[in-house]
Amino acid sequence: MLAAFYLASINFSPSGVRDRVGNAISAGLVVTVLATTAYVHVHYWRWLRQAREQYIYTNVDLLIGAIIILITIHATWKAYGKLLAFVTVGAIGYGYFGPMFPGILNHGGFDLETIIYSNSVALNGVYGFLLGVGATWVVIFILFAGIIESYGGMDYVIKIGRSVGRRISSGIPQVAVVSSMLMGSITGSSAANVATTGSFTIPLMQDNKVGDKYAASIESIASTGGQILPPVMGSAAFLMADLIGVSFVDIIQAAILPAILFYIGMAFVVHLSAHRYGWLMRDGDVMAVPEEERLSPVEMLISTAPYTIPLVVLIYTLVILRWDPMTAGLYAIIALVPAALVRDLILDQSSPSTVKIWGRRTIEGCKIGVVNMAPLTAVLASLGIVIQIISQTGFALSFSLQMVAIAGGVFILVLLLAMASSILFGLGMPTPAAYVVVAVLTAPGLVQLGIGEITAHMFVFYFALLSTITPPVALSCAVACGIAGASFFDVCKETIRLGLFSFLIPWVFVFNEQLIYWEGTTTAIIFLTSSVGILSVVIALVGYDLQAKLNYVSRALYMAFAFAIWFVPNMTVKIGLSLVLLVWVVAVFNETVPSLEKLMTSR
């Protein structure tokens, strides 16, 4: 994979000395990667049986191991920038200079030989479980996503967004919600999702009078939410299943209801904001169906077959047959490729060039998958080094114990510390990297307090992910404001205001674990009441109830209702408050009763 990554970086049309030097370096790294990989393959069994179990290895083994570590760090730097590379280098420095650190950071230290051995020759670190999951479960879905993209999957996602948008008064910004939701799950980075879908949705919103900062904010929040949507969850679902030691289906089940709550909140935020600021659909707007997209039901069924059939196969093999993700992903690809050919043959009326175009798209899709997976391979290998060192030094355990000790074992304080730590460790990280770091450092402390293991991992995962819209880094906001041409500060401010509901969802499922561990009717009731709470919070955040703008007192009342529904443990209270609030909100929306603001003003 790394060889493919460096090969893809070669500019085959160099325009100057700099390009030629860059090409020479990349070519040299390709050769080096292939040579070191060949060495590892040739000596794999000796490394496994002697080096790993008996600590018998040669100086050449150490040299190869050092080269592999250096290339991994360089590839991480090249793919994701300095931050992740510095994290890896910092971890190595922490392992070497351990005695010089104070407090819980202090440890005995390791010499360079031990660091190199334990992170390569011993088949840990670079070759740890993270890379194993990446090379099996993750790679098959990245390849699947690449082939879908080459077959026009992005256009299909945009069409779905338009189809949904045409049926809702707030349809224009809702396109961003739907498109980012669908694309976000299969990408490994919120920022990448913003760059992909945002390049279409942000200009579309701007063309329809949505302010620059609002367009960028909506896209940032929606793209971030895509990472929590099963089945892929930005590749984190596979890592979570392996780290916890549960089935992949258990992770999907645990993640689905919080994800639905997120998108209920997101859709409602957009709807209320569209009515408050006047971003509503009008006759003749650009959301009208283009002539070339006017298809009969049969044509629509055929055109969508390459996307619906593999999805059905994927759900059936994962949920019903409970196959492992790699096998399920393979069968989804097997269903996808011929379905695309049949679609092209029918819609293109068996044009002589149809098969040739299909073959070229298939190859291009495989290339896209490999190119997308290659940098993720480097990240997982680098994180393997980080995890190996912090585990060897005992820092992971010390951090969890210290977190509980600082909070005095007080449940709420431990959760607050875990939230802050997860946001901090997730800053600037792609989804898989952010999750792995917080899962090792902060999740164990929550489990010690009696929180379910999946709940604890979901809690820290959410906040590590939400760091992408949290200042001062807010990587997704940075990408979005670049597309929208808006101020970074303004975009961050609106993103936090409109997206604050997403920071509350992890707290909701920690105090209502039935959303994670399903319990039949109880789970259904908790989900419905939690949804009403989300609606109440969104009204408070947007400050509008479809009749009037709300003052801070009214917004505080809506917020208080939501908190009571979520956090009062009595089920009767939850149901009662939810019914009262739901009836009131529906009546206000239908203008059968005056809004809260008007009632307060009349007094």
Image (cartoon, helix red, strand yellow):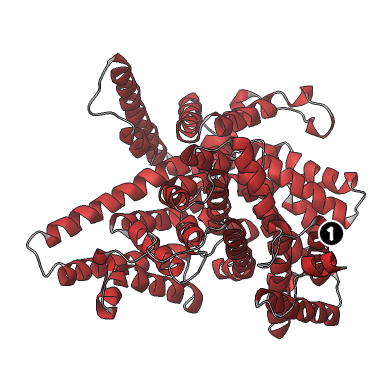
Q: Nearer the viewer, residue 174 or 476?
A: 174
Q: Which residue lies furthest to the left in this view?
A: 352
163 and 117: which one is in front?
A: 163
Q: Work out which quarter of the rendered image holds the N terminus and state it.
A: top left
Residue at figure coordinates x 49%, y 50% from the top left: 188
Residue to which mark 1 is pinned: 553
Image coords of residue 129 (percent x, y): 55, 49
Identify the residue at image location x=70%, y=64%.
Answer: 548
Residue 178 in view (yes/no): yes
* Residue 413: % across, % down: 86, 51
Query: Callout 1: 10 Å neighbours few (<14), some, many (20+)?
Result: few
Q: Can residue 426 be seen in this view?
A: no
Kindly give the residue lying farthest to the top in the view shown: 17
Where is residue 93 drawn, in percent x and y?
A: 65, 25
Q: Kindly give the residue lying farthest to the front in the view shown.
A: 602
Residue furthest bottom in the image: 521
Decide: is 82 above or below 603: above
Please state which of residues 177 and 308 is positioned toward the viewer in this rendering.
177
Q: Residue 490 is drawn in which quadrant?
A: top right
- Height in image: 82 above or below 185? above
Name the one closer to the observer, 499 or 81: 499
Question: In the image, is residue 559 above or below residue 445?
Answer: below
